Image (cartoon, helix red, strand yellow):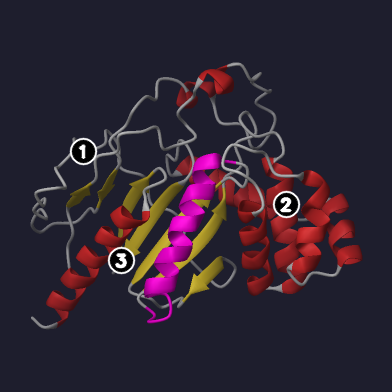
Amino acid sequence: MVYFSYIHIIVNRMDSEATQDTAHKAMPVQTQSNPFIIPGAILIGFGLIAAAIYFSGGGTTLAPTANQPLAAAPEAVTEAIRAVDENDHIRGNPNAPIVIVEYSDFDCPFCKNFHETMNSILTDYGATGQVAWVYRQFPIEQLHPNAPKIALASECVASIGGNDAFWKFSDLVFGERGVNEPTNMTQIANYAEQSGANKAEFEACLASDEMQSLVEEDFNDGVAAGIQGTPHSIVLVGGQQGTISGAQPYEAVKQIVETLLSQIEGASTE
């Protein structure tokens, strides 16, 4: 087995929706009875953070390159998430050696950026079967009031049109708005139809809230794992788990993937 320790990437910007700017602080915090409300203590005190990916296990520490200095290790490693299975939304080869599980919020501006990053990663590594991308729901209603409904809509699309329809819908939601713009809720049904879902069936599904339990399952799994903001991605390699915090740019994620692939290849030749 290959064991990975630390790969760290310094980030010189706020790259997680757990980080609150002035606009976010002005938003009212809703009651804790809502299933998509994160306890207030989790949302307080995040500033400019050095994002890191950490792999538990043993083995050696990966040496930093000249342009990739090591950052301080995070205070807590994310707890184990539930195993990926056929009920997940998977883009790419489900049996890929590297699986990136993203917990995301459809109205999060940083999630839009990371969605573009991951689409590029899948273009480069998905066709060859090296990387798979799993999307899980983590709508933070304090910051984005419409996020839970969009999450429900995406699950309705998936239930009607299948996995491909889910990903088409996701691409439309993220692609049809600006980084700092909320999703145009009047277009949700149109996005569903463009993705391959029957519009009448979609509207009936959305009105029934029948997908609520699926969204809550993802959200609660993320909270239990210690996830504090979006996007938050878990990297699964050979039974080990690592964390990518925030909206890392394409080059950073590419470097992580290349490093892991080289170690996997090296281990297979030993």
Task: Pick the residue in front: 122 or 40.
Answer: 122
Q: Residue at x 77, y 67 (%)?
A: 194
Task: Pick the residue in front: 27 or 41.
Answer: 27
Label 2: few (<14), some (14–19) or many (≥20) C-alpha neighbours in 10 Å? many
Q: Give me the disc on residue 218.
A: none
C-alpha separation, residue under disc 2 versus residue under disc 3: 30 Å
Question: Is 215 placed above or below 99 here?
Answer: above
Note whether residue 83 is visible: no
User: In which quadrant is the N terminus drawn?
Assistant: bottom left
Looking at numbered disc 3 in the image, what kind of residue is underneath it? Gly
Q: Secondary structure at mark 2?
A: helix
Q: Position of residue 183 (x, y in %)?
A: 70, 44
Q: Quadrant of residue 270?
A: bottom left
Q: Is residue 262 magenta?
A: no
Q: Mark 3 — residue? A: 239
Q: Position of residue 218 (x, y in %)?
A: 57, 51
C-alpha separation, residue under disc 3 versus residue under disc 1: 21 Å
Q: Is residue 115 magenta?
A: yes
Q: Quadrant of residue 167?
A: bottom right
Q: Mark 2 — residue? A: 152
Q: In this picture, which residue range is highlighted in magenta?
A: 108-129
Task: Pick the residue in front: 192 or 209.
Answer: 192
Labelled pair 2, 1 in contact (Cβ < 8 Å): no
Q: Secondary structure at mark 3?
A: loop
Question: Is 99 placed above or below 113 here?
Answer: below
Note whether residue 41 is visible: yes
Give left or right: position of 112 versus 44: right
Q: Earlier in the sequence, mark 3 or mark 1?
A: 1
Of labels 2 and 3, the one closer to you: 2
Q: Quadrant of residue 255?
A: bottom left
Q: Mark 1 — residue? A: 73
